[in-house]
Image: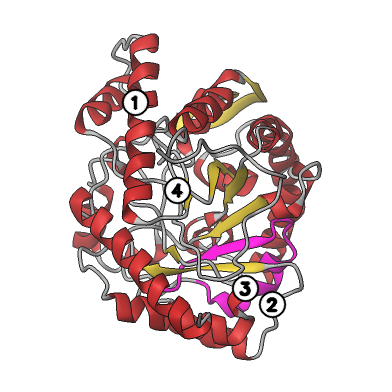
Amino acid sequence: MADPFVPKAPAMKRSTDRFLTTHTGSLPRPDDLIRAMYAKEEGVPVAPDALARRIGDAVAEVVRKQSAAGVDIVDDGEMSKPSYATYIKDRLSGFGGEGNTFVYQDLSGFPNLARRVFGDPGRSRRKTPACNAPIGVRDAQAARSDVDHLRAALAGVAVQDAFLTAASPGVVSLFFRNDCYPSEEAYLYAIADAMRVEYETITRAGFVLQVDCPDLGMGRHIQHADLSLPEWRKKAQLHVEVLNHALANIPPEQLRMHLCWGNYEGPHHCDVALADVIDIVFSARPSAIALEAANPRHAHEWQLFETVKLPDGKLLIPGVIESKSNFIEHPELVAQRIGRYANLVGRENVIAGTDCGFGTWVGQAAVDPDVVWAKLAALAEGARIATREFWPH
């Protein structure tokens, strides 16, 4: 049996002799847990203790599967959350208003596809009530439970490091409309001060915190499609300033952020270019940046780093596995993708990852669960191939 995982000094694991592997956060949930989470979202009484036990068991199972697939830096699969962002309505107070609606600019010209995207079993059930009262922390225990479940699951499992995810203030503001605060800035800072409790609970426990920041990518064509690029960049800069405020007490080396343009199978031809946001992303406190780099709309953007220098102390977690396709990437292709980044930013500054999560919403199943684990195994094999090229022994 492997030695139990014990969180080390609060710093992200960096490669010293090989390419490490990780993913973005959400992973397939067991069918019975999906049904229980559906019931909870729909107001059907669910025994809290029984649900907590089932979540704990699911976390233990998903950690074992990650380790078996060869993933080095693992998480809890977001088993306790209805989604990476909307879970906050259960942990923060102030969200009791009318539900939000969304216009995806890239889908507006494709109504049949839009119906398919919004009819996804997970996305169609999401609850996004507007903020209609001052925000506060309603359930501080939830983040501690996530920590406890992950720590217990890591006992006897061989992994390099572990992380937990949390919504950024900016993505909360994207999904939950402000009907309470006098300005967007006041709203963002109120979210940040409330979310700080969760962020610091995770990092005080010795885990790496990943803050999910689709507002810096997806927010352009959903929340702020009506703005010019310079106007939108000002919004993005504000979001990063607020994020840095929320993370002020956490060392950058214990933080990673995920940049995302939306985990849905759409045209994405309205996505903001990485080149138009990368400087703002670099100004964020986290030392590691996980970004989409495998899907057909962003796979070419590795070339940006031919002219843009990675700041000292930063590292990249490029997605070398696509999260919306049932194709299993060939390990040689994975190795090539890793190599492109390693050649440009340095092998020690690259961790191989996935574009996005495989269970962004409870019930989302764009990729068959069995295929997910095969894709993660291909990720690990591709990292081994790239290691032989870049770290010859």
Q: Which residues are magenta?
A: 272-294
Q: CA distance from mark 4 to mark 2?
A: 24 Å
- Give the CA separation, mark 4 to mark 1: 17 Å
Give the residue drawn at x 70%, y 51%. Answer: 11
Q: Secondary structure at mark 4?
A: loop
Q: Is residue 256 left or right of residue 120?
A: right
Name the mark on residue 117.
none
Say whether disc 3 or disc 4 marks the residue closer to the N-terminus. Answer: 4
Hey, which quadrant is residue 377 in on the image?
bottom left
x, y percent for residue 166? 56, 41
Residue tagged by mark 2? 310
3D distance between C-alphas at marks 1 and 2:
40 Å
Residue at the image point whose x is 45% and y is 46% from the top? 158
Of circles 3 and 4, the one toward us is 3
Q: Determine whether 39 is above or below 200 in the image.
A: above
Secondary structure at badge 1 equals: helix
Task: Answer with mark 1 or mark 2, whichever residue precedes in sequence.
Answer: 1
Amino acid type at image mark 2: Leu
Could you say where residue 49 lies in the image, as x and y percent from the top left?
Answer: 39, 10
Which residue carries the number 4 mark? 25
Is 237 situated above or below 364?
Answer: below
> Image point 36% across, 66% down: which residue?
379
Q: Secondary structure at mark 2?
A: loop
Mark 3 lies on a secondary structure that is: helix
Percent across and percent down for residue 86 are 46, 36
Which quadrant would the N terminus be assigned to in this image? top left
Residue 189 in magenta stretch: no
As drawn, the label of residue 348 is 3
Magenta span contains residue 276:
yes
Q: Between marks 2 and 3, how big is the CA–CA gap?
A: 12 Å
Q: CA distance from mark 3 to mark 4?
A: 22 Å
Point out which mark residue 57 bears.
Answer: 1
